[in-house]
Image: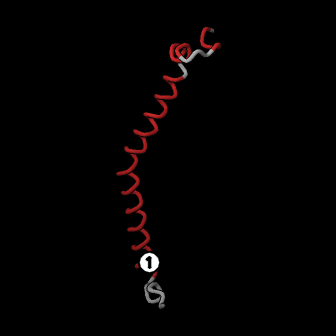
Amino acid sequence: MKDPFIGMDEASKHIVDALSVVTVLGTLVDMLPSVAAIFTIVWTAIRIYETKTVQSWLGKKDAVN
């Protein structure tokens, strides 16, 4: 199989590299709100689980402190 980049000049390679970076950034920006929402939900659930009220419901002895 022939390498498609053999005949390309350096300027064309830089343009293709820039398009690749823009594509990756666009994908991350579109995906980032969903990932941030998932982490926020998990973090909030952990914080609620750690409260004294929830710990007392679960019968943890250290919850009274």
Q: Is residue 25 left or right of residue 51?
A: left
Q: Nearer the viewer, residue 2 or 41?
A: 41
**SS assignment at label 1:** helix
Where residue 18 sits, quadrant-wise, is: bottom left
Residue drawn 47% across the image and 34% down it: 42
Q: Nearer the viewer, residue 30 or 51?
A: 51
In the rendered image of this protein, does residue 43 appear above or below residue 15?
A: above
Q: Position of residue 60 (x, y in %)?
A: 61, 16
Q: Is residue 62 left or right of residue 24?
A: right
What is the count of numbered marks?
A: 1
Quarter of the image with the C terminus is: top right
Question: What is the three-letter code of the residue carrying label 1?
Answer: Lys
The residue identified by callout 1 is 13
Q: Position of residue 31 (x, y in %)?
A: 38, 50
Q: Is residue 10 left or right of residue 26?
A: right
User: Which residue sits furthest top?
Assistant: 64
| Figure colour scheme | secondary structure
Q: Position of residue 49 (x, y in %)?
A: 52, 23
In the rendered image of this protein, does residue 26 appear above or below residue 39?
A: below
Residue drawn 39% across the image and 73% down it: 15
Mark 1 nearby-residue class (10 Å; few <14, some 14–19, many ≥20): few
Q: Position of residue 41 (x, y in %)?
A: 43, 33
Q: Nearer the viewer, residue 37 or 10?
A: 37
In the rendered image of this protein, does residue 16 appear above or below residue 43?
A: below
